[in-house]
Amino acid sequence: MGNDRVETFEDLIAFAETRSDVLALSLTGSRSAGFEVPESDFDCALFVVEGTETEVRQELGDIPGALDLRFFTPRSFASHAEWGSDLAWDRYAWFIAKFVVDKSGGELPNAARQKGLVPENELDDWIDGSLDWYLNQVARSVRCITRGDETGGRLECAEAVRPFLQAAFAVHDRRIVPYYKYLRWELDQRPLVKFGLGPDEFAGLVLSLVTSGSLESQRKTLELAEKVFKAHGFGRRFEEWETSKWGSRYFADR
C-alpha cells in the first residue's frame, strides 16, 4: 500500500481492517468523547503485532498532519503511562478511548480502560494520601481566612480541589480524575453517586471552592466528604485531623 492511500482517518480504518499485522485502531482525545470541532485532529493509535512496527510504518509512509498517530504493540502499551510514571497524565485518555477496529477479542480495549483506574493495590494509599492532602489544604485555607488573609485563603482552597477530586473519583470504582475539559461530561456519563448529588450540584460544589473559597463552601464540602469517606472505610485522616472539632474552631458564627 502506498502512502498516498492513507490521506484520511477513513483510509486508516481501511488499512487497519485489512492488515493481519494490525491488531487494533483507537481514537483518543476530543473525537473519542464527542467534543470535536471540524478542525480537530484525529488523535489515534495503531496497535500492531510484536516485531512488525517498522514494516507497518514503512507501509504507511508519511502520515497527514491531521492524523496524530501513535504506534503500540501489546507489550509496549502494557508499560505505557504506568502508575506513578512521568506519563501517568496520559492514563485518562485511554479510559475514554474509542476502538474503531479491534481484532484482539476485547483485550486491548480492556487494557486501555484499566489505564483510567487506580491500580487495586494502590487504591487505599491513593485515597488516604489524597484525603490527607485535601484536609491539609482546608486547614491552611480556613486559618488564612480567619486571620483576614483572603488571598492566601482562596489560593489554599483552590489547591484543595485536586486532592478532593482524586479521592472522590477513586472511591467510585477506582476511577481517576478526568482532564478538566472533560470533568462536566464525565459527571454526566458516570455520576459520583456516593455523594448524593447530581452532576450539576457536584460541579457547582467544586466551582464554589474555586470561585469563592468561602468558609461556608468549604464547610459544606468538608462535611459531605467526611460523611462519604467514613462510610467507605476512609475515616482515619478525618480523625487524625480532628475535623469533628473544626466546626467550633473554624466555622462557628462566621
Image (cartoon, rainbow, N blue to C red):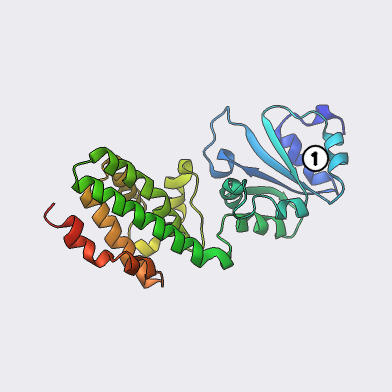
Judge the density around disc 1: few (<14), some (14-19), many (≥20) Cα neighbours within 10 Å: some
Residue pictured at 72% horizontal, 40% vertical: 70
Q: Nearer the viewer, residue 246 or 89?
A: 246
In terms of secondary structure, where does tag 1 sit? Answer: helix
Q: Amino acid at mark 1?
A: Phe
Q: Quadrant of residue 155?
A: top left
Q: Nearer the viewer, residue 157 or 17?
A: 157
- Judged from this view, the residue extending furthest toward the left is 253
Residue pictured at 16% horizontal, 61% vertical: 248
Viewer can see residue 171: no
Residue pictured at 82% horizontal, 26% vertical: 4
Give above or below for 88 relative to 127. above
Q: Position of residue 117 (x, y in %)?
A: 56, 58
Q: Position of residue 84 (x, y in %)?
A: 59, 53
- Judged from this view, the residue extending furthest toward the front is 147
Which residue has dot 1 on it?
A: 15
Relative to residue 137, is residue 103 drawn left or right? right
Viewer can see residue 2: yes
Q: Position of residue 140 (x, y in %)?
A: 30, 50
Give above or below for 242 relative to 205. below
Residue pictured at 54% horizontal, 35% vertical: 36
